[in-house]
Image (cartoon, rainbow, N blue to C red):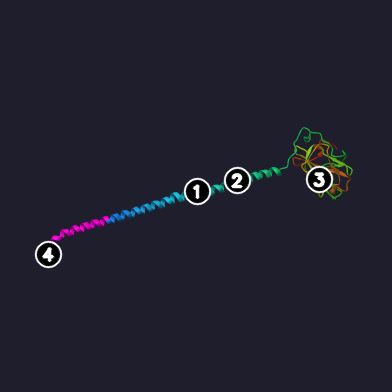
Amino acid sequence: MLLRCFIMTAKDKPNNKNLRALFSVICLCIIALGLIVYFSTQTRDTENVNEATTIAETTEVQKRVTVKETEKETTAETKKQTTEKTTKKTAKTTEKPTMETGDTNTPFESFYKYPCDEAVLFGYTEELVKNDTMGDYRAHTAVDFKCSAGAKVSAVNDGLVMSVTKDSLLGKVIEIDHGGKLVARYCGMDTVNVSEGDYVTIGQTIGTVGEVPFEVNEEPHLHFEMTFEGKTVNPLDAMSKTE
């Protein structure tokens, strides 16, 4: 009996080897199939993730950033242009016009009228002279034309009224640009018939004589000053007149 079992076992050995080999092959196939399925799934997931991130999300982010940045740049450029236009407009508005020089109002050459009476009460001097009202010595960079109180004051030539002001020493002052950078100041006015920005013609009445506070002890007169290119000049020289 034992011999028979030994013989049968010996006969079954080849079959067992074949079964083991078959089983091993099947296991290897199952493992290989599992690996194929696993890696296939991983590849698909990776492609989906990469595609969504690199194409969809990136495009969307770039689109949002581009739109916002473009809007900011456009807004900044618009503000800049508006500011430049406003600045230019303000500069043009605040810039005062000047009187153009013509053949009839060229400084030191053209004909000028006296602003009132031709009599000179006190002439132009850059030296220090006694001021009876103030009790001191100072230069008299003007010409005092003798005029009765209330006498009419005329524009010495065509011009543009630059300002009408009141000064503690000079009284009411009318400043007129007579062209060619020649500016006249009519000081000690009583009434004033013109305003800033008005154009006047030679001989036009611009007001009446009043008094000059720092020369009030003198006879009634018009205190008349002139500047050429910003520097004080003798009005009689500028108008080619003599005392």
Compute the Cα span from label 1 to label 4.
83 Å
Residue at 15% x, 60% y is 13
The stretch of residues the image draws in magenta is: 5-29
| Residue holding disc 1 | 63
Q: Could you tell me which secondary element the residue under label 2 belongs to?
A: helix
Q: Earlier in the sequence, mark 1 or mark 4?
A: 4
Residue 89 visible, this angle: yes
Q: Could you tell me which secondary element the residue under label 1 belongs to?
A: helix
User: Is 50 displayed left or right of 1 in the figure?
Assistant: right
Q: Amino acid at mark 1?
A: Lys
Q: Earlier in the sequence, mark 1 or mark 3?
A: 1
Front-lying residue, 14 or 149: 14
Decide whether the magenta segment is chiefly helix, strand or loop: helix
Q: Earlier in the sequence, mark 2 or mark 3?
A: 2
Q: Could you tell me which secondary element the residue under label 3 belongs to?
A: strand
Compute the Cα span from label 4 to label 3.
147 Å
Which numbered tag is attached to residue 78?
Answer: 2
Which numbered tag is attached to residue 173?
Answer: 3
Compute the Cα span from label 2 to label 1.
22 Å
Compute the Cα span from label 2 to label 3.
45 Å
Which numbered tag is attached to residue 6?
Answer: 4
Residue 121 visible, this angle: no
Indicate which label's residue lies in the foreground, 2 or 3.
2
The reply to whether the magenta stretch includes residue 227 is: no
